[in-house]
Image (cartoon, rainbow, N blue to C red):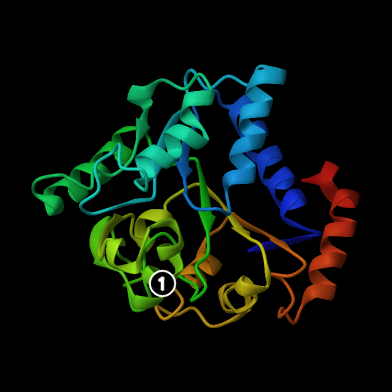
């Protein structure tokens, strides 16, 4: 896992957007794996700007979101489908039929999970997966203890996740208790992953993800096994890393061998 330490949230978003923009320009029919939450919002704002100002073309791109709450309709103000529509899809020229978010109202959720896997497989797999990290080191809704080989599944949310997400609802009681999520095994099949983390509240999770043991107690740590993952973290989120000198040295000197790669 490559680790890129940046000043702040804005630079984190800039770096991530540069990777996504380059990937779309190189492969116009890119299959994107997308995340929700506050962390990738800056990235999405920059993608919208690249579309409006520089003509970044999403017309052939396809997307698959990581997860969705069970029990929320697509038009619910806190559904992840609505989040993606408002934060990205409605502002670029991606075709609505090419955007996919798990259906929290699906009848037969287990069958729906299998069908979602099939849709990703039929699209050729995810080329570039955007990820955030929870405070306890979970990725998507793969809570601590989730199998590192898991596929798309229905999961119960932990009290910590419910508490973290309650700020988006009127009260914690309104936060759904279950979600549909891509599994760790599914995420690891993406050709490239970008992991984003910002703020002091993520510092413990970043250290556990990047430098800790690979364990289902910290599901994001499985990304250490991925052949092409870059973690872009700001100074505050990187505060507990032990090998920051090496990560910075690597960043500063990488360009010296770029033409030999």
- Exactly how many numbered labels are in the figure? 1
Question: Against 229, is 53 above or below?
Answer: above
- In front: 130, or 149? 130
- Taking the spot 71% from the left edge, 80% from the top edge, the residue there is 240
Specify few, some or many for label 1: CA neighbours under 10 Å numbering under 14, 14-19, or 20 or more: some
Query: Could you tell me which quadrant the N terminus lies in?
Result: bottom right
Q: Tell me where residue 153 sits by quadrant.
A: bottom left
**Foreground pick, 72 / 22:** 72
Report the residue that reaches farthest toward the front: 170
Q: Is residue 125 visible?
A: no
Identify the residue position indicated by label 1 in the image.
163
Res 181 → quadrant:
bottom left
Q: 110 left or right of 225? A: left
Q: In front: 156, or 168?
A: 168
- As drawn, is 246 to the left or to the right of 131? right
Given residues 200 and 227, the one toward you in this image is 200
Can the viewer see residue 112? Answer: yes
Percent from the top left, x then y, of residue 49?
Answer: 67, 27
SS at badge 1: helix
Residue 4 is left or right of residue 67, and the answer is right
Q: Position of residue 149 (x, y in %)?
A: 32, 66
The picture places residue 43, in percent across and down from the top left corner, at 63, 42
């Amino acid at each position: 896992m490559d680790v890129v330490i940046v000043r702040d949230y804005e630079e984190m978003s800039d770096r991530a957007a540069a990777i996504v923009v380059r990937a779309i320009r190189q492969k116009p029919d890119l299959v994107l794996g997308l995340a929700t939450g506050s962390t990738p919002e800056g990235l999405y704002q920059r993608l919208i700007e690249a579309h409006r100002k520089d003509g970044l073309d999403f017309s052939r791109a396809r997307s698959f979101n990581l997860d969705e709450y069970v029990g929320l309709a697509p038009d619910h103000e806190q559904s992840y489908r609505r989040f993606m529509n408002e934060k990205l899809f409605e502002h670029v020229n991606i075709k609505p039929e090419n955007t996919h978010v798990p259906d929290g109202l699906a009848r037969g959720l287990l069958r729906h999970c299998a069908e979602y896997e099939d849709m990703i497989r039929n699209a050729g797999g995810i080329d570039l997966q955007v990820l955030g990290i929870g405070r306890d080191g979970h990725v998507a809704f793969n809570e601590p203890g989730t199998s590192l080989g898991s596929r798309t599944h229905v999961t119960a949310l932990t009290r910590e996740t419910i508490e973290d997400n309650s700020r988006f609802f009127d009260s914690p009681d309104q936060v759904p208790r279950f979600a549909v999520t891509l599994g760790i095994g599914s995420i690891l099949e993406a050709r490239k992953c970008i992991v984003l983390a910002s703020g002091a509240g993520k510092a413990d999770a970043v250290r556990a993800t990047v430098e800790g043991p690979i364990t289902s107690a910290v599901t994001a740590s499985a990304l250490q096994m991925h052949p092409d993952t870059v973690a872009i973290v700001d100074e505050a989120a990187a505060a507990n890393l032990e090998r920051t000198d090496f990560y910075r040295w690597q960043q500063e000197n990488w360009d010296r061998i770029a033409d030999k790669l």
